[in-house]
Amino acid sequence: MEWSNKSVVTEFILLGLSSSWGLQLSLFFVFSIFYGATILGNMLIILTVITDSQLHSPMYFLLSNLSFIDVCQATFATPKMIADFLKEHKTITFKGCMSQIFFLHVFGGSEMVLLVAMAYDRYIAICKPLHYTTIMSQRVCTILVGVSWTIGILHSASHLAFTVNLPFCGPNKVDNFFCDLPVVIKLACLDTYFLEIMVLTNSGLLSLICFILLLISYTVILVTVQHQSSRGTSKALSILSAHVTVVLLFFGPLLFIYIWPFNSFPIDKFISICFTVFTPFLNPIIYTLRNEEVKAAMRKLRSRHIESHHMF
């Protein structure tokens, strides 16, 4: 079967979260607050890690990169969703739709691999503490971050390579607040069964590999922690609990997606909100509340800001 770009669709109609004007107005204020708090929280973590020399370590270097990805994840679709709450007709251009698909999978794929890198960092720190500084050098950390972005970009490009050339010749209503790949593929004017299997295999394989690596890492870490002193165990478990919570927040919705990948359910929109709004919002809260070093560094940053303000 030959595919050619005979698309006559120049824009897609986004059905959004609700057709009720009153509810949309309420959602406008709610998600505006969530988005603002997400950007502020993640940027605060990045700024704190950069300015505090005590946080210049592999764990916090990776954490600041996770915060950067969360900023990107929250920004590729949420501002448009917020603006669309005030519009009667919610549309997005064909190129804009393809861009959203691309960035969704870039940031999602990169975050999955980065979470594995963060688990590897904790594995070395807890299981091989004497070799930690040697193994987790600045060069290794930079490579891990580079690999996460490279895999995310390749993963997304493999999806976009066939999606952008699909023939869209009529139906253009996307039942979501952004262009989600499974929903957009269904609008193509051909039998999409084979494409759906390709998407499921591509995304599912990456997710499964990352999840298995995370499961192995945290299992080994927990076994190791049980043989350490109570003080060391308490600190390690505190950090681990934050990591595990973030992993569950990220991979939990994926479980639902890959059990019923191309069937439409009302909960699909909630899962989309989890990825683009709730997860980026909760990540900085989880890492801050469970980490005394980050909280202490933030207090120091606030004190410096207050002192500099009084000087002027």
Image (cartoon, rainbow, N blue to C red):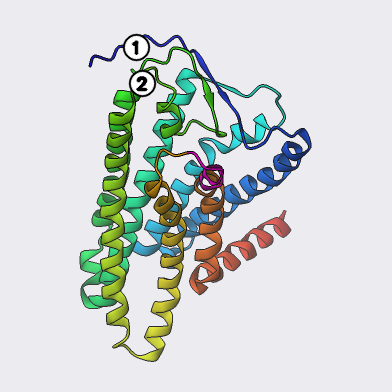
Q: Is residue 1 above or below residue 69?
A: above
Disc 2 from disc 1: Cα separation: 8 Å
> How many C-alpha atoms fall within 10 Å of the one at disc 2: few (<14), some, or many (≥20)?
some
Is residue 57 something one can see in this rendering?
no
Q: Which residues are magenta?
A: 264-271
Q: Earlier in the sequence, mark 2 or mark 1?
A: 1
Q: Callout 1, which amino acid?
A: Asn
Q: Find numbered disc 2 in the image and state the secondary structure of the residue it sits on.
A: loop
> How many C-alpha atoms fall within 10 Å of the one at disc 1: few (<14), some, or many (≥20)?
few
Say which residue label 1 marks.
5
Query: Which residue occupies the extreme bottom position in the image?
Result: 229
Residue in the image at 58% along x and 54% along y: 41
Task: Locate residue 125, reporting x and y percent.
Answer: 29, 72
Residue in the image at 51% along x and 74% along y: 292
Residue in the image at 74% along x and 40% along y: 23
Task: Locate residue 258, reporting x and y percent.
Answer: 37, 47
Is residue 288 something one can see in this rendering?
yes
Tag 2 near tag 1, CB within 8 Å: yes
User: The N terminus is located in which quarter?
Assistant: top left
Residue in the image at 21% along x and 67% along y: 134
Query: Toward which corner of the image does residue 240 lie, by quadrant?
Result: bottom left
- Give the left or right position of residue 55, taking residue 20 as reference: left
Which sits in the foreground, 225 or 305?
Answer: 225
Which sits in the foreground, 86 or 286?
Answer: 86
Query: Which residue occupies the extreme right position in the image?
Result: 22
The reply to whether the magenta stretch includes residue 270 is yes
Query: Toward which corner of the image does residue 116 lie, by quadrant?
Result: bottom left
Say which residue label 2 marks.
164
**Looking at the magenta stretch, what is its main secondary structure?**
helix
Which sits in the foreground, 241 or 263?
Answer: 263
